[in-house]
Image (spheres, rainbow, N blue to C red):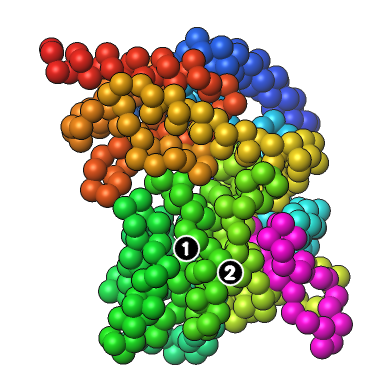
């Protein structure tokens, strides 16, 4: 078959078509975003998958192709109707940012430049931005930033790398922890006597990482927690004694900063001191909470985080960055070298070039320019403004806590520390989930639920600045009405 002719004129024509599509995208987004900002649309576009397949005509487009800018605009309008409306005041569900537009510009630029910057020569500008963003993060933690040309014998610095999401970041950190306690595991396999201390309230990706690393689910020893899922420091010695009595070695201890379900923080400083005393790798899962380091008013929740050996920080949560963009930070940058040993001659060219290769720090080979998104939000809005955003969301949750607690029939199990708030209406566990599902199916509000101390609670994550007291009053009204209709059909 003869190859289709592709010329400079074809390339330029495709560029013009792309420009037309970008203009159409912005126009469609403008109408969509304004409707969401004004609360005129539903908070979520949830629908059965079969309806979406039919109404978007997805299979025909895949089979036949032929979309142009005009058809794309019509398709996009339907697509956005089925999307989650993060800019809608009634979206109060998951820990996903309302993405700010500077970082969204980076996503567009990343899409058209397509520089996979794990190898410096494949994306030198993007790699340089990541280097600087990681160093900014290290300084916020209180660790010495990485240097390009360390003098022989210089004290070790901290280091980091960006990954596509917190789950992969947690896995990467625990790889480094495994290399510390079992340096031969990469070549000889995983010893069968390793164990990890993990609170039951920890994100599921941590226990999953333990199994992926080859330790097995039985290597997870649950730390004792209080009624709200916060680690009990007074029970740490007993937890370690249990591991030793089973003839195992503690590879790492994981703490929440903060818990995904509740937004509550484990006491990092006493946990860190315990780990230092017993020479245990201390991993702080700060995917959600690390952004509080930008705000002097709320960073006290992270007191002691500098004692950790590894920290993960999702910028696509509280830094208003589009998904996915997470950082793995290690107190000793050389732990990356111990975690990953493989070499690839077609990728690594020694040190002959003045470069900053990060491929030896990650599970991934190809990575997008995630640091660009973080950089543009910092450069455009400023660290102080981003810190104010975190503080304001935390303070909003406190106000909503007071409002909900004062409403007859509603209760909150604890005072929130972050922008995550749990509450319930009445005492029927099944009713909580039924109410949530009804609100979501009707599109009135998008909220989540969680189990806490064996009971089902509704759960809010206050990400949107437009979510205010009036929004919460309408939510409580809707919950009451839904529950009453369910009780009296």
Closer to us: 115 or 134: 134
Which of marks 2 and 1 precedes in the sequence? 1
421 with respect to 28 (left or right): left
Q: Which residue is mark 2?
A: 308
Prevailing secondary structure of the magenta residues: loop
Can see residue 296? yes
Neighbours of disc 2 within 10 Å: few (<14), some (14-19), many (20+): many
Query: Residue at coordinates 62% horizontally, 33% vertically from top-left?
Result: 392
Quadrant in the picture for residue 97: top right
**Residue 450 percent location from the top left of the image:** 32, 42
Quarter occupied by the C terminus: top left
331 with respect to 173 (left or right): right
Q: Which residue is mark 1?
A: 255
Q: Secondary structure at mark 2?
A: loop
Looking at the image, is 188 positioned above or below residue 144?
Answer: below
Q: Secondary structure at mark 1?
A: strand
Looking at the image, is 247 positioned above or below residue 478?
Answer: below
Quadrant in the picture for residue 47: top left
Circles 1, 2 touching at the beta carbon (< 8 Å): yes
**Residue 422 percent location from the top left of the image:** 38, 37
Residue stretch in magenta: 137-162
Query: Residue at coordinates 62% horizontally, 75% vertically from top-left?
Result: 336
Query: Residue at coordinates 56% horizontally, 66% vertically from top-left?
Result: 269
């Amino acid at each position: 078959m003869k190859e289709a002719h592709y010329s400079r004129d074809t390339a330029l024509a495709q560029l013009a078509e792309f420009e037309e599509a970008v203009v159409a995208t912005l126009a469609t987004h403008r109408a969509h975003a304004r409707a969401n900002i004004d609360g005129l649309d539903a908070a979520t576009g949830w629908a059965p998958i079969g309806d979406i397949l039919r109404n978007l005509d997805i299979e025909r487009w895949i089979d036949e192709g032929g979309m142009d800018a005009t058809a794309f605009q019509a398709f996009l309008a339907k697509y956005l109707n089925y999307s989650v409306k993060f800019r809608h005041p009634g979206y109060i569900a998951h820990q996903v940012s309302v993405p700010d537009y500077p970082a969204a510009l980076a996503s567009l630029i990343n899409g058209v430049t397509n520089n996979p910057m794990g190898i410096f020569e494949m994306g030198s500008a993007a790699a340089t931005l990541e280097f600087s963003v990681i160093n900014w993060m290290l300084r916020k933690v209180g660790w010495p930033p990485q240097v390009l040309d360390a003098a022989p014998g210089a004290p070790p610095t901290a280091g980091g790398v960006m990954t596509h999401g917190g789950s992969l970041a947690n896995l990467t950190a625990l790889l480094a922890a495994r290399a510390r306690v079992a340096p031969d595991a990469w070549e000889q396999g995983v010893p069968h006597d390793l164990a990890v201390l993990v609170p039951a309230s920890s994100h599921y990706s941590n226990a999953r990482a333990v199994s992926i690393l080859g330790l097995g689910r039985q290597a997870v020893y649950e730390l004792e927690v209080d009624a709200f899922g916060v680690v009990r420091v007074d029970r740490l010695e007993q937890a370690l004694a249990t591991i030793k009595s089973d003839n195992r070695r503690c590879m790492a201890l994981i703490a929440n900063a903060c818990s995904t379900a509740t937004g509550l923080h484990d006491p990092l400083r006493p946990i860190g001191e315990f780990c230092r005393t017993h020479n245990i790798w201390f991993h702080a899962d700060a995917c959600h909470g690390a952004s509080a380091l930008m705000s002097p008013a709320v960073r006290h929740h992270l007191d002691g985080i500098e004692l950790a050996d590894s920290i993960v920080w999702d910028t696509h949560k509280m830094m208003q960055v589009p998904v996915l963009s997470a950082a793995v930070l290690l107190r000793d940058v050389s732990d990356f070298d111990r975690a990953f040993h493989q070499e690839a001659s077609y990728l690594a060219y020694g040190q002959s070039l003045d470069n900053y290769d990060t491929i030896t720090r990650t599970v991934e080979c190809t990575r997008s320019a995630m640091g660009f998104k973080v950089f543009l939000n910092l450069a455009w809005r400023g660290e102080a403004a981003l810190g104010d955003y975190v503080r304001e969301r935390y303070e909003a949750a406190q106000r909503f806590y007071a409002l909900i607690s004062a409403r007859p029939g509603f209760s909150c199990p604890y005072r929130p520390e972050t922008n995550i708030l749990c509450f319930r209406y009445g005492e029927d566990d099944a009713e909580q989930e039924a109410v949530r599902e009804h609100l979501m199916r009707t599109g009135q509000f998008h909220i989540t639920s969680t189990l806490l101390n064996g009971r089902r609670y509704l759960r809010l994550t206050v990400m949107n600045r437009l979510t205010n007291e009036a929004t919460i009053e309408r939510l409580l009204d809707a919950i009451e009405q839904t529950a009453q209709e369910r009780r009296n059909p």
